[in-house]
């Protein structure tokens, strides 16, 4: 069974450094919203009321994402300064992300953490491995989606570094999905593993990710676009 193509739900986005990201980018603390896909349920550009930071990982989040069932002591934490980087973003202000509860996915390309929000699940990523001893995320991005939509695989974000010009895509999937197929703009397809509910894709600079396909628990083939 195949589902219709779904555009990604990028409810918030941050970028640290010089980059373009689908979401709300910040450089040195200044927010500038880039062009966004047309989607009526996308509230990323809406400055809604501040939401209480969630004090815990919810039962729904633990049931959906195995990464939240890991002990915090078994997960490499976010750099200590990352909380400050994220403090004024919509992830924390509007969706209640608790970065202190973030779990490291241990992905092969870049770095990624999953954090609980208030009725939302949030993905935080860095385009490269974070250097040992780093206090902040040198090239980080983050996005949140409602728990139900994150459970459907709709949480995907794209970041393009200017030096070098290369796309980095990160996405979150529920338990039971081991790999995704990334369809590239040059017509080729690459298979990428899902590690602790997270996949990351860094195509060669001459191409980019057009869509990501995966089979969910009931066998339905789902396509999402960054």
Image (cartoon, helix red, strand yellow):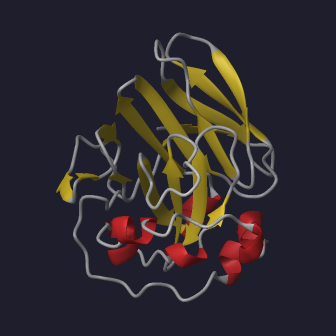
Is any atom of residue 200 visible in this view? Answer: yes
Q: How many marks?
A: 0
- Along the line of sight, the residue nearer the viewer: 215 or 10: 10
Asked if 20 appears above or below 184 in the picture, the reply is below
Q: Quadrant of residue 160?
A: top left
Is residue 189 positioned above or below 157 on the image? above
Quick check: 121 above or below 219? Answer: below
Q: Position of residue 155 (x, y in %)?
A: 53, 53
Quadrant hosting residue 110: top right
| Residue 94 visible within the image | no
Image position, residue 44 (x, y; %): 31, 59
Residue shown at 61% from the left, 67% from the top: 77
Location of residue 34 by image quarter: top left
Where residue 28 appears, x then y in whole percent?
A: 22, 55
Residue depicted at 63% across the width and 37% down the height:
109
- State left or right for residue 39 relative to residue 155: left
* Percent of width and height locating residue 87: 34, 73
Q: Is residue 77 left or right of residue 85?
A: right
List the single residue furthest toward the front.
133
Q: In the shown orientation, is residue 8 left or right of residue 178?
A: left
Q: Residue at x 62, y 55 (%)?
A: 152
For the residue pair 65 and 110, the one nearer the viewer reads as 110
Q: Quadrant of the N terminus?
A: top right
């Amino acid at each position: 069974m195949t589902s219709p193509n779904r555009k990604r739900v990028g409810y918030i986005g941050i970028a640290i450094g010089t980059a373009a990201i689908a979401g709300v980018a910040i450089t040195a603390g200044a927010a500038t919203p880039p062009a966004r896909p047309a989607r009526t349920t996308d509230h990323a550009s809406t400055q809604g009321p501040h939401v209480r930071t969630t004090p815990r990982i919810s039962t729904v989040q633990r049931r959906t994402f195995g990464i939240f069932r890991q002990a915090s002591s078994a997960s490499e934490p976010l750099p200590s300064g990352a909380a400050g980087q994220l403090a004024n973003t919509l992830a924390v202000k509007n969706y209640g992300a608790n970065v202190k509860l973030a779990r490291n996915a241990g992905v092969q390309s870049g770095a990624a953490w999953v954090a609980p929000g208030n009725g939302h699940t949030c993905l935080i990523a860095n385009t490269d491995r974070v250097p040992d001893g780093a206090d902040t995320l040198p090239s980080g991005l983050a996005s949140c989606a409602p728990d139900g939509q994150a459970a459907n695989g709709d949480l995907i974000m794209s970041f393009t570094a200017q030096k070098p010009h290369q796309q980095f895509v990160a996405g979150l999937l529920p338990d039971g999905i081991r790999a995704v197929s990334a369809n590239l703009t040059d017509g080729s397809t690459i298979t990428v593993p899902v590690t602790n509910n997270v996949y990351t894709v860094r195509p060669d600079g001459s191409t980019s990710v057009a869509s990501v396909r995966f089979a969910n628990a009931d066998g339905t083939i789902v396509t999402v676009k960054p």
